[in-house]
């Protein structure tokens, strides 16, 4: 009450003594209110408008308002100032307004214009942004692509973001679900069908065989500001995600090494400090079932606690004829995450989190596709080609799940020194243990009388990492700046072993199971240590030109990398082969953007990023390779129209890809790889389009498209000594996705909705030297349901979903297997058949 009185007294002074026939709220006034904390903004607004504004201090805490400039009526200006925040203004009397909170306060910033006047620079913000329901226009999308919270439409980067509601509607709960192609320029595929590691590609830049610990990925993955160093362990279910940001193109300045293709930035929801439960139950075909819990506990002693739990399982969709063995593509996942937010003062906060998960997923099934011409193909009577997706394995074979165990601690400390300066520290320790169990079941070795087949591949990776990042995020009169320091250290070891688990009879009409050898030495094993330190900075300057619509950005990152490793076992015997890599470099970036209007921005962006070198542990010489570099030019347009009911963003890019790390397979021994840096420069050009339309209240239509063309230099094949043409992997020339969703008017029992989405892509190569391509495809998905059904003190939502409605089938990955004694065929993996299920969700 005291806070309310203070604000009423402070804000009502300007209203005393006003007289005239026209009430103050109906008069047009000249406003010049910068974006600032709400407590100061309403005082400034009251002085300029001549009306009284009443509000409680608690409602205003932590809220940043929009800037307002130009001539407008009081109500119009108030609506602009509070648009997108948790505050709402209600008229109270002739010359007074009461401001109250309609959502949990959050620091949100938008740049608003009245009469197309320029606005000052948006100050730095870091809090999460709650979902805003808007029945008339498209929702504002907030991202942290430049380490500060800002509107996606005002960020000069080709990016897209999926909020928690979109992720749920699309059925995305882990990285593997991104294989659907919901984001056309982002491709995700299990590496060689494995459930234990993923190949993530953006703008044609892929990780290659990043399952090796001595090699780094090409796309940087961050979760709550913490860099994840390995592609293993990414199969775990995502916990309650606030949003997933896909930043396309090199992100070398702010996201560092190994962001040559782009970055995937995942932000989870923070504790609210208010008691609440979000409980979801799910059942689906293939005996799928899931239980997901998000529990917020009441704030106690200034500490807010949140607990997230996940428990999911599903049978495989390709049956294994061997009794007691796992089916291919089955999984069982569980995990827990506890986060605690302590806010000892309004300007200081500490967010601690601990998570632990276990993912037991069986690998994919290798189907025998095209046969290599002019090669021997000895299959036997039980083995044959599989030109279409199968539902049952050709042979019953031992198969166990690949087990990924991941856990980690994170601590984020934030000090809001003043309204224009924040200092943030992000500290994390993480470790993972990932086993791999692959079963070829007759697809690898050709038939020989009384010979062995059924290649079983076992592997294990153990890794731990420590990272520390310090950020200084601030703004001055015409300058926004981000300064940072980063430290990362990683230790890892791995081993791999394979054996033949099936034995043929003399005619190939029957077979028996061969037990795994006891105490057999690993085929190969290695260790690796990495250390990376970096300093970076980025400045955005808005000169006093063109009504403050021009923004100039420049950034620079200094990185020092050191890596060393050794191949400790080679072909079952000890090895002393080793490698070292070190690099010190500067990676610059710059952009120029211009606000054509409040709703339209054009920009030109240039940047350089690099991926560290390493060594190939599948090489019999442990051959090392050097770093690679990407230089990118990008021109973009971002615009909103039809009173924010339409949005259209387009980016054109041209990249020079130098010293590409290219993998080659030994034609005599397909398990032997070599990695070379290609001579010359690859050229990659493309277009990315994102569009959205809300023609009617409740109706939203989205669409995205990407086109990519590349030209690769000739590269010397180390096995043949001949220059050859190679391919960018998982890079379709054309890819698109679209969705349509309609939320009906609220009824007495809830709010019905219906959603459809689809994805399309042309075929692409799965391996640099493999001429075979995957199939073009189109898949469609749907979800219908009823939300916000009042049950007791909470709400119940129910929905029915279906993926791959038309049961479309296509190859998702291919690998050429050749050599003496092999099937000399192209292995193929197919997409999942039609799946469907029901979800129930209760919240209070």
Image (cartoon, helix red, strand yellow):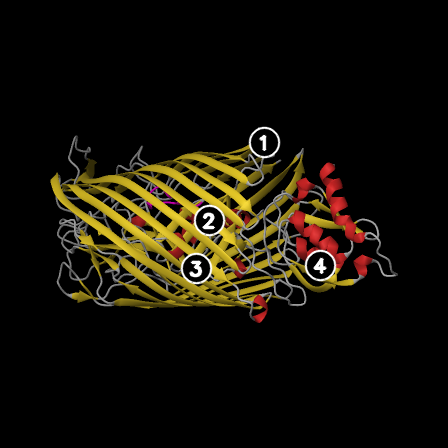
Of the image marks 3 and 2, the number of the one nearer the N terminus: 3
Q: Nearer the viewer, mark 4 or mark 2?
A: 2
Q: Earlier in the sequence, mark 4 or mark 1?
A: 4
Q: Is residue 420 magenta?
A: no
Q: Nearer the viewer, mark 3 or mark 4?
A: 4
Mark drawn on residue 77: 4
Magenta-drawn stretch contains 226: yes
| Residue drawn where x is 65% and y is 40% of the image | 789
Quarter of the image where one finds residue 320: top left
Range covered by the magenta-colored residues: 225-234
Residue 184: numbered disc: 3
Marks 4/2: CA distance?
A: 33 Å
Q: Compare marks 4 and 2 and give the one earlier in the sequence.
A: 4
Q: Dot 4: few (<14), some (14–19), or many (≥20) neighbours within 10 Å?
A: many
Residue 220 picture location, percent across and down: 37, 51
One can see residue 775 in this view: no
**Who's the residue at 61% across and 44% down the image?**
62
Q: What x and y, as percent, mark residue 147?
A: 47, 52
Residue that numbered label 1 is attached to: 299
- The quadrant where residue 394 appears: top left
**Looking at the image, is mark 3 or mark 2 nearer the viewer?**
2
User: In this figure, which residue is indicated by the disc labeled 2?
Assistant: 472
Residue at position x 44%, y 54% in the image: 246
Which element carries disc 2, helix, strand or loop?
Answer: strand
Q: Give the Cα distance between marks 3 and 2.
A: 34 Å
Query: Label 2 to label 1, Cα distance in Å?
Result: 28 Å
Residue sitting nearer the eye, 518 or 410 = 410
**Number of other residues with Cα within 10 Å of mark 1, as a class: few under 14, some 14 to 19, many 20 or more:** some
Q: Are marks 3 and 2 in contact (CB under 8 Å)?
A: no
**Horizontal arrangement in the rendering, residue 183 relative to residue 103 (left or right):** left
């Amino acid at each position: 009450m005291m806070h309310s009185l203070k604000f009423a007294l402070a804000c009502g002074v300007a209203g005393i003594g006003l007289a005239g026939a026209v009430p103050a709220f109906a008069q047009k006034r000249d406003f010049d209110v910068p974006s600032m904390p709400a407590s100061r903004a309403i005082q400034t607004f009251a002085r300029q408008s001549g009306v009284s504004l009443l509000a409680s201090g608690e409602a205003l805490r932590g809220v940043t308002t929009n800037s307002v400039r130009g001539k407008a009526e009081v109500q119009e200006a108030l609506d602009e100032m509070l648009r997108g925040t948790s505050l709402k203004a209600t008229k109270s009397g002739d010359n007074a307004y009461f401001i109250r909170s309609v959502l949990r306060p959050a620091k949100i910033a938008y740049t608003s214009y009245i009469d197309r006047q320029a606005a000052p620079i948006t100050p730095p913000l870091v809090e999460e942004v709650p979902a805003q329901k808007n029945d008339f226009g498209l929702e504002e999308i907030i991202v942290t692509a430049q380490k500060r919270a800002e509107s996606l439409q005002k960020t000069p980067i080709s990016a897209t973001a999926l909020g928690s509601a979109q992720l749920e509607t699309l059925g995305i709960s882990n990285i593997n679900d991104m294989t659907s192609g919901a984001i056309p320029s982002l491709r995700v595929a299990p590496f060689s069908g494995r459930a234990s590691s993923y190949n993530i590609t953006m703008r044609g830049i892929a990780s290659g065989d990043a399952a090796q610990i001595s090699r780094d990925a090409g796309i940087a993955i961050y979760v709550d500001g913490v860099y994840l160093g390995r592609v293993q362990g990414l199969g775990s279910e995502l916990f309650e995600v606030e949003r997933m940001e896909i930043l396309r193109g090199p992100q070398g300045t702010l996201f560092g090494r190994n962001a040559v293709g782009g970055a995937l930035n995942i932000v989870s929801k923070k504790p609210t400090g208010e008691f609440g439960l979000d409980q979801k139950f799910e059942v689906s075909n293939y005996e799928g079932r899931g239980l997901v819990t998000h529990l917020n506990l009441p704030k106690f002693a200034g500490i807010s606690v949140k607990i997230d739990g996940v428990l999911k399982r599903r049978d495989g969709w390709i049956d294994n004829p061997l009794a007691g063995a796992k089916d291919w593509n089955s999984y069982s996942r569980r995990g827990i995450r506890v986060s605690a937010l302590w806010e000892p003062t309004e300007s200081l906060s500490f967010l601690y989190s601990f998570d632990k998960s276990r993912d037991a997923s069986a690998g994919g099934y290798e189907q025998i596709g095209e046969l290599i011409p002019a090669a021997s193909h000895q299959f036997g009577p039980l083995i044959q080609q599989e030109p279409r997706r199968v539902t049952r394995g050709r042979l019953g074979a031992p198969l166990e799940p690949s087990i990924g165990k991941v856990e980690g601690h994170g601590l984020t400390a934030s000090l809001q020194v003043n309204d224009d300066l924040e200092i943030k520290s992000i500290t994390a320790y993480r470790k993972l243990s990932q086993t791999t169990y692959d079963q070829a079941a007759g697809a690898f070795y050709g038939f020989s009388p009384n010979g062995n087949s059924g290649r079983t591949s076992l592997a294990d990776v153990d890794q731990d990492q420590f990272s520390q990042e310090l950020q200084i995020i601030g703004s001055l009169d015409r300058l926004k700046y981000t300064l940072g320091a980063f430290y990362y250290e990683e230790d890892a070891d791995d081993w791999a072993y394979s054996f033949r688990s099936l034995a043929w009879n003399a005619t190939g009409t029957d077979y028996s199971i061969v037990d795994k050898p006891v105490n057999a030495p690993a085929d190969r094993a290695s260790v690796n240590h990495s250390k990376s330190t970096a300093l970076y900075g980025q400045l955005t300057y808005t000169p006093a030109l063109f009504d403050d619509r021009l923004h100039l950005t420049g950034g620079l990152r200094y990185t020092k990398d050191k890596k060393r490793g050794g191949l400790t076992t080679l072909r079952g015997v000890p090895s002393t082969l080793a490698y070292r890599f070190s690099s010190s470099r500067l990676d610059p970036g710059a952009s120029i953007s211009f606000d054509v209007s409040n709703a339209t921005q054009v920009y030109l962006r240039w940047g350089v990023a690099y991926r560290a070198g390493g060594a190939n542990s599948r090489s019999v010489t442990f051959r090392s390779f050097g770093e690679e570099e990407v230089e990118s030019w990008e021109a973009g347009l971002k615009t909103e129209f039809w009173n924010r009911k339409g949005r259209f963003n387009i980016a054109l890019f041209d990249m020079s890809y130098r010293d590409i790390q290219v993998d080659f397979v030994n034609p005599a021994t397909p398990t032997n790889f070599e990695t070379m840096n290609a001579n010359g420069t690859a050229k990659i050009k493309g277009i990315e389009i994102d569009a959205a339309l809300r023609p009617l209240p409740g109706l939203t239509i989205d669409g995205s498209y990407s086109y990519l063309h590349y030209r690769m230099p000739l590269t010397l094949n180390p096995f043949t000594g001949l220059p050859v043409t190679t391919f960018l992997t998982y890079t379709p020339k054309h890819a698109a996705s679209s969705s349509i969703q309609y939320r009906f008017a609220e009824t007495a029992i809830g709010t019905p909705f219906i959603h459809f989405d689809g994805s399309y892509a042309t075929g692409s190569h799965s391996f640099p030297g493999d001429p075979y391509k995957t199939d073009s495809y189109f898949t469609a998905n749907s979800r219908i349901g009823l939300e916000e059904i009042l049950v007791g003190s909470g709400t119940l939502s129910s929905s029915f979903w279906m993926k791959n409605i038309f049961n479309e089938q296509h190859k998702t990955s291919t690998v050429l297997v050749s050599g003496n004694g092999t099937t000399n065929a192209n292995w193929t993996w197919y997409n999942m058949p039609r799946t469907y299920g029901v979800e129930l969700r209760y919240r209070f």
